[in-house]
Image (cartoon, coloured by chain):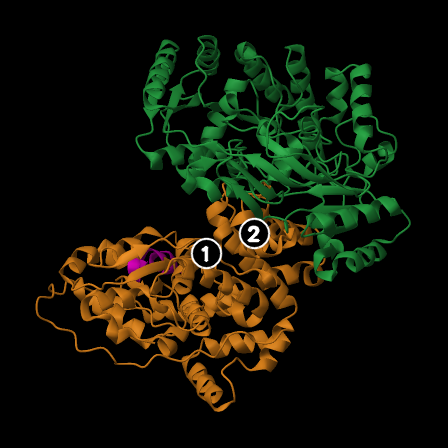
Chain colours: A green, B orange
Amino acid sequence: MSFSDADLARKLEALLGPEAVLSGSAAGRAYDCDSYTVEKNNPAAVVLPRTTEEVAKVVRWCYQNNVPFTARGAGTGLSGGALPAMGGVIISTKKMAKILDIDLPNRCLLAQTGIANKKISDAVKEKGLYFAPDPSSQSVSTIGGNIGENSGGPHTLKYGVTVQHILGITMVDPTGEILKLGGKIEGAPGYDFIGLIVGSEGTLGIVTEAWVKLNVLPKTVSTALIAYRTIADATKTVADIIAQGTIPAALEMMDRGILRAVNMAFGFEYPANTEAMLLIECDGEPDQVAREMEAVQQVCQRNKAIEIRVAEDEVERARLWVVRKKGIGAMGRIAPSIVTHDGVIPRSKLPEMLEFVYDVSFRYSIGVANIFHAGDGNLHPCFYFNDRDPNQVQRVVEAGEEIIRRCIELGGSVSGEHGIGVEKIDLMPLMFSPADLELQALSKRIFNDGMLCNPCKVLPNQKGCVEYKKHWKGAAC
Amino acid sequence: MMKDLLELTTHCIRCGFCLEACPTFVTTGNEMESPRGRIYLVRSALEGRVEWQEDVRPHLDHCLGCRACETACPSGVEYGTILELARDKVEQDKPQFTKLTLLNSTTKPSALRAQLALGNLLPGKRMPGFISKVLSGHSAEADLPTPQKADTLPPLNLANLTPIRGQVYLLEGCAMRVLYPRVHEATRRLLRRVGYEVLDVEQGCCGALHAHNGYVDNAKRLATELLLSMPKEIPVIVNSAGCGSTMKDYENLLPDTAGAPKMAKRTFDASEFLFNNGLQDVLQTANGIAVRATYHDACHLAHGQKITSQPRALLEAIPHLDLVPLPEADMCCGSAGIYNVLQPQMARSLVERKYANIASTLANVVATGNPGCHSWIAQASKEHGQSVLVLHTLELLEAAFIGLEHFGN
């Protein structure tokens, strides 16, 4: 790339108009990371296109001029997916947040991908429908980001992750061509390119519009909060519930560290001596919900629950969910920075894994709080620390790596839903053989033979990244 | 000790939950126009990584100060305080004299009266264009407000009123007393209806506009004077959300003044006080009004004081009134103190969005608890053919007793 930052901004302004381009040191700073704050790098410029065609214009220009580009939605990612690893252009979807079409009879909706996840459910709530994937950041995180990371959420346990809810997409490939994949019907024959694009972390192109599936709101929802005196009692409950065959809509766990934060944030009360709490939700037809809830509560009691609180009305239910969904956000009450991992393990291993997490926290002298999708075995150990202390940052990174290694040893995965980004890129070889990784690299080449489209993400050891990595690795402050 | 700005910024862990709550972010999609972006830029300026005036100031200037982000923030980041301290920093380093002049003239009743009288002699009704140009580089959008006429309500019928059980102060406010004397009149009558009489005292401005706009020292001076003018330990009733929000925070504005924490505790928004004292029951004896009404949350009531249910409960208690929900009710209308003069374009885009939401409810009346929202939304209503009557919540409540005909524009 042979442009100065200012030159580059002027070229982009000529393409999209000056109001759609941000540049200068403040813009560089504001867009130097997402919610993963340990690694940072300034983009040369930021563009805010309004349509698929405008995205294509920018990408085509970047492709022709050898300028790297990275898509960004709300910037709430937890693995650095929106980090401009090689600088270049950030393509923000935040001016593309419109609902374009709602097809009620066929229960699907077409939206631009900069729309916040929850806005989709809000738009069809009165019709008794909703969009099922519900990452905790759903009030802000975009559908584009959810597609990039194949996001899950508390209700993933019963309803599946994002990929199960995307019917068709419009995307701009890394050369600037507009592609349309899938459509409004499920299960089209041939290769499943949607399955490949969803979860590819913006490395195969930029998804600009999507047809999403709408689910029917359940008739009855029952939510309970169960307190335990020990972590082991809670994790044992989770394993037992799954083992006996009940699939709740959500099965979440919070430990004492999180309870302290949500107590400070929302005045949330819990019994003294509580070490862990489970949030369990069942939904569906009234009699089925009653049956499931009964079965669940029996398992809880068998595992020495000290309190079982069932939400009495919609207001209380909503309150319990605020506590869960904003739990990680509330950690700012305790420390200036957090890093949250999302390794996955078989559910039967939960008790020993949690013990291991606390042990790691103790050995590295870094505080940890746990709030996670227990039913999926999807951990979220949240390390809290001060990112202005390089030594603490280093320890956080090492502690995280140790936890991920253990997840893999136990037969799990490096990531359940936050993506690889730059955060876990060096851990990929722990999970995949060189042949596996080569096959993934080959799939990437279907769309992208160059190094411009969200470079240095997902696949380790990409050529050209080593030099750039020095800029962002550990650039916390 | 005032709070430490750098320390305040470190509570933001960049989760981004504030983004969709921020009117300027939702409108622009620009991270620098979001609470998270602004906090990050302030922190970066304090750490010497970006320039205060060049890099940070424009984005602080664009902030409405609505504090909707505080409601959304799970980490309890005190954004309002960060904004006040950061604005004070950039304003004191490089004062904008036109802005200070505007602030001072708006907050001195005599100067405001003179300015409005003078304005009526000029062609057109807009703020003088040169002020707007100097401040924002754009043409003015806000009309010069037309003050309400005083003493237009019929005498209060003293029969059947509950006996007087106590005294309160009423904050007359700087702009409020000039522009909305009828709101004050309604407030006094409603207070009397629940058994309170107003103890009148000579009083000045509360300092809110100065505090919000980077003149913390001026704000402190005004706040100290106001404290001295209300020495008795009786409730202080406020019917302007921005003022109430600042007065409830006097403890932080005047950390070394003995009376400040007590003042904060005895300050009540009028809707809050009337609700606490049972106006909803008294309303059952009123004739009521058969209108379809909706309610707009003033930012400094909903986000600054967390008051959302009391005004709605009171309005719902008006016999025959049909209160319908307003979409995006707690999103800023763009008035934001003197923002609609300082940032006319963003203010315009937000009031159009607000008005479209109001129109979608098919309400005949919209009620709100702050003079800034009142005049800004009223202007929009006028521009859209006067289809909706804009009233202060307290006017609508008093209208329940004496009829809506006394409250025309």
Q: CA distance from mark 2 to mark 1?
A: 12 Å
Q: Nearer the viewer, residue A391 or A348?
A: A348
| Quadrant of the drawing holding the C terminus of chain B | bottom left
Q: Both on one chain, marks 2 and 1?
A: yes
Horizontal side of B120 relative to A364 (left or right) equals left
Identify whether A109 is placed above or below B403. above
Q: Which residue is mark 1?
A: B252
What is the magenta range?
A: B257-271
Whether A312 is drawn above or below B78: the answer is above
- Image-based side of B144 in relation to A423, left or right: left
Image mark 1: chain? B
Instruction: Name the residue: 61% across, 81% down.
Output: B130
Q: Secondary structure at mark 2?
A: loop
Please say whether residue A248 is one of the residues in the magenta stretch.
no
Given the current orientation, which residue lies at the most extreme left position?
B159
Secondary structure under the numbered disc 1 in the rendered image:
helix
**Residue B166: x %, y % from top left:** 18, 63
Question: Which residue: 77% across, 39% down?
Answer: A173
Per the image, is B270 magenta?
Answer: yes
Can residue A386 be seen here? The reply is: no
- Tell me if A195 is positioned left or right of B265 in this view: right
Camera-side residue: A457 or A25? A457
Q: Which residue position is annotated with label 2?
A: B4
- The image shows residue A301 at horizontal and vertical percentages of 35, 12
**Neighbours of disc 1 within 10 Å: few (<14), some (14-19), many (20+):** some
At label 2, the amino acid type is: Asp
Label count reads 2
Q: Between residues A290 and A304, which one lies in front from this camera angle?
A: A290
Q: Amino acid at mark 1?
A: Asn
Viewer-proximal residue, A405 or B226?
A405
